[in-house]
Image: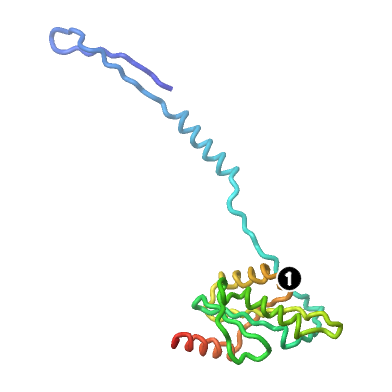
Amino acid sequence: MADIGETTTTTGKHKRNRAKKINVRVDLTPMVDLAFLLITFFMLTTTLLEQRAMDVKTPDNHSIVDTYVSECQLVYLLADSGGRYYSWEGIECKAVTPVDLTGHNSIQQKLKARRDFLKTHCLYHDGTSKPLLCIIKLLPGSRYEQMVALLDEMHTDSIATYTIQDYTADELKAVDAAHKSMALH
């Protein structure tokens, strides 16, 4: 712990006592032990950031069923290497339009407009509207964050059916053309 010791000093021939010198010695071993015990305790009891993952439902290989969809149901969402997003509707990729995650020209606005269109123009024989189907495509160089942002958009907008597919050469050409036209404006 702590020890206090007194010593007297004598000088020269006269051997008289000058001043008493007090030596204080503090033993820090118990405090170091306590510090290491606390560090060990907090290391063992602290939980680090837990990983959160998204559930991905994959179809069984045994239950492949052909599903016919109308051209009016399809909305394609593309992400490129520059952090930009594009969309197009229908089956053939003729031209893509740039969209944003937020704002006036957002993906959410685009999907809402397409849903409204489905309610009036794309109906089953019994009069109910067909569901919206989104196809997400990640172009070369796109980042993981972009895919997560698009999947979050599907969840936020309650899109029940969506898929991630590979891109085609026609889509790459359409995105390059859209990018060049944006650069000219």
Residue shown at the point (73%, 75%) measured from the top left: 161
Q: Amino acid at mark 1?
A: Lys
For residue 16, which quarter of the picture? Answer: top left
For residue 88, which quarter of the picture? Answer: bottom right
Q: Report the side of 113 relative to 12 (left or right).
A: right
Q: Report the side of 117 relative to 181 (left or right).
A: right
The furthest residue to the right? 126
Q: Position of residue 52 (x, y in %)?
A: 64, 59
Q: Position of residue 87 (x, y in %)?
A: 60, 82
Q: Can you say whether 4 is above or below 181 in the image? A: above
Q: Nearer the viewer, residue 136 or 90?
A: 90
Total numbered labels placed on residues in the image: 1
Q: Nearer the viewer, residue 47 or 112?
A: 112
The furthest residue to the left? 13
Q: Secondary structure at mark 1?
A: loop
Q: Position of residue 112 (x, y in %)?
A: 67, 76
Q: Report the side of 137 relative to 181 (left or right).
A: right
Residue shown at the point (53%, 37%) measured from the top left: 38
Q: Report the side of 117 relative to 175 (left or right).
A: right
The furthest residue to the front? 120
Instruction: Residue under label 1, please give it.
Output: 57
Point out the image quarter for the C terminus.
bottom left
Q: Can you say whether 77 is above or below 48 in the image? A: below
For residue 122, which quarter of the picture? Answer: bottom right
